[in-house]
């Protein structure tokens, strides 16, 4: 069966490899001139690791990744607010890991034969017909597929064409900044690795994870002033905003060269899609359920999608595609949309300021560790 996968990000590559291994005739289309993934590091929670294992792609994660340290929420100075027992949660559902994004992408695409990949090929339209789906690029048909997997990311062009009445993305009015650097000698980051720091004064947050044996990956969600700034200006504003945070926070930001800082506006779908599948076409990853980064589920949900669509299309022929993709939708949409809504709630919770943030902090301190740990484990269960 011929399957076209549109978009060669982490989710699209994973789906292409999984479908290829199941014997389908796969073509992976990428608008960029080459297959590569920019950025710093990526958090993969236990459900994402299990999905990669199902696809037969978990070896790199298990061999290279070091277990992440997760420990609830703390205030901007590192004092506990919501305490979880991450070790207990990971014992019950598996390990959360952090890996370098570019290396993970390279490892995932390794099993895919180069001749199945078409770069510099933006897909602008899909035309379903009785004999399959015609794939349109630059105004002309380039192929016909029995099934199409749309994995073209948060700014998906095809999502808008498939669901013309959907409102699309909602901008959160905040910026996601990420950086990675070798661990500075003599800098104590123990307090940062124990949880996500949130600030009731500015509504900002900061998190830190170890990557490999010597690198550190930091990220922050902040409402910086003006239009989305470049890395230099973002770094300057962060240093001013977080000058009185836990001492390691400004030290890490200052030690990160601007060239190694990535700045992106935070956006999510304004409302859930009514379906992840339309006849012979299915959506995957951010194209289907773009969510805020607050639960760290973006990549893991894409991997769950890839594993599910591979499983549901296993052994399928052209005549059975639509029904198989309806089953994929029935499995994936309730969970992914539930996490999308939960992530938005978490974003609103951690970005509160003023009197409501004082109340929030008091309530967080009152949550029993066992309950917080159970809620964390529930997110990680597929």
Image (cartoon, helix red, strand yellow):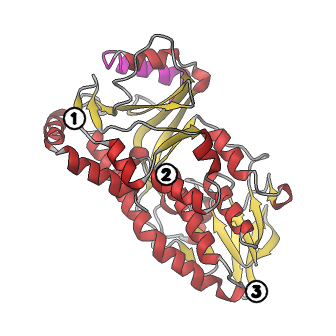
Q: For numbered disc 3, what is the local secondary structure?
A: loop
165 relative to 24 in the view: left or right: left
Residue 167 position (above or below residue 170): below
Q: Nearer the viewer, mark 1 or mark 2?
A: 1
User: In the image, which disc is placed on residue 298?
Assistant: 2
User: In the image, which disc is placed on residue 131?
Assistant: 3
Is 183 contained in the magenta span? Answer: no
Residue beneath the point at 67% across and 46% down:
105
User: In the image, which disc is placed on residue 301?
Assistant: none
Which of these two is toward me, 286 or 234?
A: 286
Q: Give the range drawn in magenta.
A: 229-246
Residue beneath the point at 64% across and 46% down:
60
Which of these two is toward me, 101 or 172?
A: 101
Please rate how many residues cluster around mark 1, counting C-alpha atoms within 10 Å: few if below 14, some from 14 to 19, many from 20: many
Q: Position of residue 195 (x, y in %)?
A: 33, 34
Residue 183 position (above or below residue 354): above
Please rate how many residues cluster around mark 2, counting C-alpha atoms within 10 Å: few if below 14, some from 14 to 19, many from 20: many
């Amino acid at each position: 069966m011929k399957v076209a996968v549109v978009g060669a990000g982490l989710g699209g590559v994973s789906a292409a490899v999984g479908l290829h291994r199941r014997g389908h005739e796969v073509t992976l289309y990428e608008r960029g001139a080459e297959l590569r993934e920019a950025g710093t590091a990526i958090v993969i929670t236990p459900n994402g690791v299990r999905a990669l294992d199902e696809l037969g792609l978990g070896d790199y994660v298990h061999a290279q990744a070091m277990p992440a340290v997760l420990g609830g929420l703390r205030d901007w100075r590192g004092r506990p607010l919501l305490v979880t027992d991450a070790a207990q949660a990971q014992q019950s559902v598996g390990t959360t890991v952090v890996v370098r994004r570019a290396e993970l992408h390279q490892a995932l695409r390794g099993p895919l034969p180069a001749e199945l990949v078409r770069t510099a090929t933006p897909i602008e339209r899909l035309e379903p017909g009785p004999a399959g789906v015609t794939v349109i690029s630059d105004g002309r048909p380039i192929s016909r597929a029995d099934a199409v997997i749309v994995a073209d990311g948060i700014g998906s062009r095809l999502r808008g064409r498939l669901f013309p009445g959907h409102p699309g993305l909602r901008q959160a009015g905040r910026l996601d900044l990420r950086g990675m650097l070798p661990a500075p000698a003599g800098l104590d980051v123990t307090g940062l690795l124990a949880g996500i720091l949130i600030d009731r004064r500015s509504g900002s947050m900061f998190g830190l994870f170890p990557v490999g044996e010597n690198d550190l990956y930091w990220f922050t969600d902040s409402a910086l002033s003006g239009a989305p700034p470049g890395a230099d200006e973002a770094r300057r504003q962060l240093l001013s905003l977080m000058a009185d945070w836990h001492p390691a926070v400004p030290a890490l930001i200052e030690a990160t060269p601007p060239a190694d800082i990535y700045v992106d506006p935070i956006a999510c779908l304004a409302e859930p899609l009514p379906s992840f599948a339309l006849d012979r076409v299915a959506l995957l990853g951010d194209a289907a359920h773009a969510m805020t980064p607050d639960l760290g589920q973006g990549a893991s949900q894409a991997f769950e999608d890839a594993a599910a669509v591979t499983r549901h299309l296993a052994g399928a022929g052209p005549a059975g595609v639509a029904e198989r993709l309806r089953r994929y939708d029935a499995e994936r949409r309730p969970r992914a949309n539930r996490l999308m809504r939960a992530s938005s709630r978490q974003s609103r919770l951690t970005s509160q300021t003023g009197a409501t943030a004082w109340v929030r902090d008091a309530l967080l301190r009152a949550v029993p560790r066992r309950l917080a740990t159970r809620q964390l484990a529930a997110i990680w269960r597929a």
